[in-house]
Image (spheres, rainbow, N blue to C red):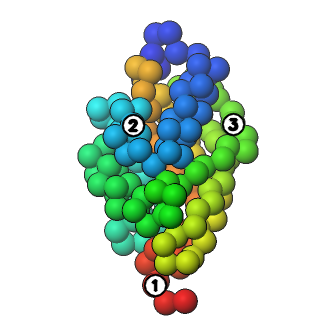
Amino acid sequence: MVSIQSTPAHNKEIAQTFLDIFSTGNVNAILDCLHEDATWWISGKIGGISGTYSKAEIGELLAGVTSAYKQGALPVRVLGMTAEEDRVAIEAESYAELHNGKIFNNEYHFLITVSDEKVIQVREYSDTLHIYEIFVNMQD
């Protein structure tokens, strides 16, 4: 649903701010950017990672994952952004060192939907093999 005063340019600002805050690792601030009815879908078939999460569930997932990063956060850098109506398509990459010595460096396509000045839906596409190798398959 498109907000009454919503414009593609404004929605891009909301999406950029959201990813900037996401990059801090501050889970409460990240959750503040999300609409109460927000969902976050992560591509793939990785148990415990892939699938659809509610706002509360994504908070739990992020709290667990951010503790694995040396900086306590996963910085995400936007490479490109396009918006139409309430949707913002984003190409991005991340880079973080983990406490176990591994490097998490992934590429993404996010499709973010905005409603009432908040992010109501995130669809995250990324290199799921890399996620598996870094977070699930603990063998080096």
Amino acid type for the residue under numbered disc 3: Met
What residue is shown with label 2?
29
- Please state if 19 lies on the left or on the right of 49 as rendered: right
Q: Residue at x 39, y 37 (%)?
A: 29
Quarter of the image for the C terminus: give it.
bottom right
> Counting other residues with Cα less than 10 Å from the Cα at mark 3, is it few (<14), some (14-19), or many (20 or more)?
some
State the residue lying farthest toward the top. 5
> Counting other residues with Cα less than 10 Å from the Cα at mark 1, is it few (<14), some (14-19), or many (20 or more)?
few
* Label 1 to label 3: alpha-carbon separation: 34 Å
Q: Earlier in the sequence, mark 2 or mark 3?
A: 2
Q: Which mark is residue 28?
A: none
Contact check, label 1 and label 3, Cβ < 8 Å: no
Q: Secondary structure at mark 1?
A: loop
Q: Is residue 138 above or below residue 55?
A: below
Q: Secondary structure at mark 3?
A: strand
Percent x, y of residue 11: 56, 24
Percent x, y of residue 130: 58, 73
Amino acid type for the residue under numbered disc 2: Ala
What residue is shown with label 1?
138
State the residue lying farthest toward the left. 56
- Please state if 82 lies on the left or on the right of 1 as rendered: right
What residue is shown with label 3?
81
Q: Earlier in the sequence, mark 1 or mark 2?
A: 2
The reply to whether residue 109 is in sight is no
* Label 1 to label 2: alpha-carbon separation: 30 Å
